[in-house]
Image (tube, helix red, strand yellow):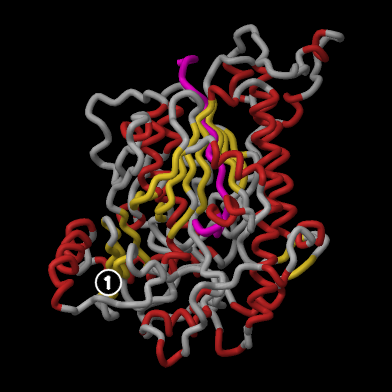
Amino acid sequence: MASQPNVLVLMADQMTSASIDLITKGDIVAPNIAKLIERSANFADAYCAYPLCSPSRASLMSGRLPSNIGAYDNGAEFPASVPTIAHYLRNEGYDTTLIGKMHFLGPDQLHGFENRLTPELYPCDFSWTPRWQRDATRYPYETGAGNSDVGTVLDSGPAVWTMQMEHDEEVSLLARHHILNAARAGRLRPWMATVSFTSPHDPFVISQEYLDLYDENTIPMPAVSPVNYEDLDEHSKLVYEINGMAKYSIGESETRRARRAYFAMISYVDTKIGAVLQALEETGQAQDTVVVFTSDHGEMLGERGMWFKKTFFEPSVQVPLLISYPGRITPRRSTGPVSLVDVLPTVLDLVGARSEQGHPHLDGTSLAPDLLDNTKSDISTVAFVEGHDNATVAPRFMVREGDYKLVYSEAYAPMLFNLRLDPHELKNLAGQDEHQEVELHLRDLIFERFDVIGLRERIISSQNDRRLVTQALSMGRTRDWKTGSTVEASSRFVVSGDAFPDVERKGYVRQGSVTEAAPMTAEETTTMV
C-alpha cells in the first residue's frame, strides 16, 4: 500500500477552460497554476457533466452521469449508496479527507471521506428544488432561493472581505496543515485529499490588491458580442429571463469591470493553491503525489451577453483539467473531448487500484493508458453533458465527439456545431442536408446513453417528492444536515500524558523530508489530519 502515490484533487469553482489559455499567455496572473500547467497533461477540451454545481460535483466524485445517480439539479440528493472516489481509495488503504466546498446534498456529508475539515458553503437540503410542473402545489418555503441574479455582475469590484474569501482562506490553511501533518505522521498510509475553493464563483468581488494586478483598459473582452433577445435560441431566452437580464443594463464598461474582477479572483485562488502545492514541495511529497486540477463548470463571462452557467455553450460547459504525476505522465497539451466522469477511473488506474473486472458501472473512461504512453499526444473520449435545472422546461442533453457537438432536447430546436471550423458556435448546422448523417449519429449517441423519453416524468416525480419532504421538514423540530469538522482538535496538540521535549519534536517537519514515524495505533490513525 505504501508504494501507492498520494492523490490531491484541487478544485476551483466556475472557472472556465479558456482561463488556462489566458494564464499561459499571461493575460491572467496565476503563476502557481502556470507552473502546474507546465508539469501536467493539459486537457484543452474537457467538459463537466452538468453546468451546475451540485450535479457536476456528484458526477465527478462518482464517475457517473448525474441522471444515473438521481443528481438532477441543485436540490437533489446525492445517494449515500453511490460509491465515490473516496470509497474506492479508502478500500485501497488511503486516508481520505475533504477540505472545502463539495455541495453534497442530503444527510450524508462525507460520502466515503474519513475526515471533513470544513462545513458546506451552501444548503445541504432539498430547498433549492425546481418546480417544472406549474400546477403542482406551491409550499410556503418556496422563495426562489438559490437562483443566481445577474445583478451581482454590477457589484464586481473591490471588497476587504467576503464570504468567499473567508471560505477560501480557511480551505487553503487547513489543506496546508493537512499535508504538513501527513508528513509529520510518517508514510503509513497514502492519502487522498480533495481541496475545493469557491473562487472565482460569482459575485466577482475581491480585495483591491488582486484587482491592482490588472489594467481594466487592457482586459480581453468577449469574443462574441451580446445577442439581441429576439435573436436568441429559445433556451437562451429562458436563461435570459431566469437570470433577470431584463432588469439590468450591462454594457461594455460593466462587462470589462466584471471580467477584470473575475481574473483577479483567479489570481487570488492561485495564491491559495500555491500555498497548498508549496506544502507538497516543502515536505518532499510532490514527487509521490498525483495532482488533479479542475472546476465544476465554466462561466459565460459576458460571451453573447450571457453570464454564469446553465447553458451548453462552450464557456459554460468546458472546464480546466490538469493531471500531474511526476516521472510518470509527460506534460503535454491534449485536444479532443474528455469528461470529468473520466477522472475517477483515471485516478484509480494511476494509483494501481485493485480491479478484477474493471468498473463497468462507471460512465467514465480511464485516460490512464494514454496518459502513461509518452507517444500519445492527443487523448479523447466522447463527452456527454446534461441539464435539468430551473432554467429549462425539459431535460437537455449535449454530446461532443471529435469536432462536432450536438445539443438536443424535446422542448427546444437542436443545435449542431463544428467546433473546429466554428469555435464560437455562431452557425447552427442542425437540419442541413449535408450534416444530416453526423446529426443523426450524435442524436443516436444521446438516446443510447440517456433515457430521453422517460427522464422528464422521473424528474418531475422526484421534484414533487423533494418539495413535499422539504415542506414537512420545515415544520416543528428542524435539523440541519451540514457537517462541521470531523477532527477532534484536542488530539492534534499536547494532551495529557505527553512529555517534553519528545512531544515538541514530534511536531517538527523538516525541509524536504517526510518523518519516518513509528507505526500509529488505530486510534491515532483516525485522528490524523
Please give the range of residues in magenta.
Answer: 1-19
Above or below, comparing residue 76 to residue 95 in the picture: below
Front one among 235 and 313? 313
- Measured as percent of width and height from the top left, residue 321 is found at 47, 47
Residue to which mark 1 is pinned: 416
Q: In which quarter of the image is the N terminus?
A: top left
- Considering depth in this image, is 114 or 288 the residue closer to the camera? 288
Q: Which residue is drawn at 44% across and 74% down?
A: 390
Q: Is residue 6 magenta?
A: yes
Picture quadrant of residue 274: top right
Residue 71 within the segment the image draws in magenta: no
- The answer to whether 125 is drawn above or below residue 87 in the figure is below
Picture quadrant where residue 183 is located = top right
Q: Is residue 191 left or right of residue 448?
A: right
- What is the quadrant of the C terminus in the image? top right
Q: Nearer the viewer, residue 97 or 321?
A: 321
Residue type pointed to by label 1: Leu
Asked whether residue 389 is in view, the answer is yes
Instruction: Tell me what residue is drawn at x 53 percent, y 43 percent.
Output: 293
Residue 141 seen by the camera: no
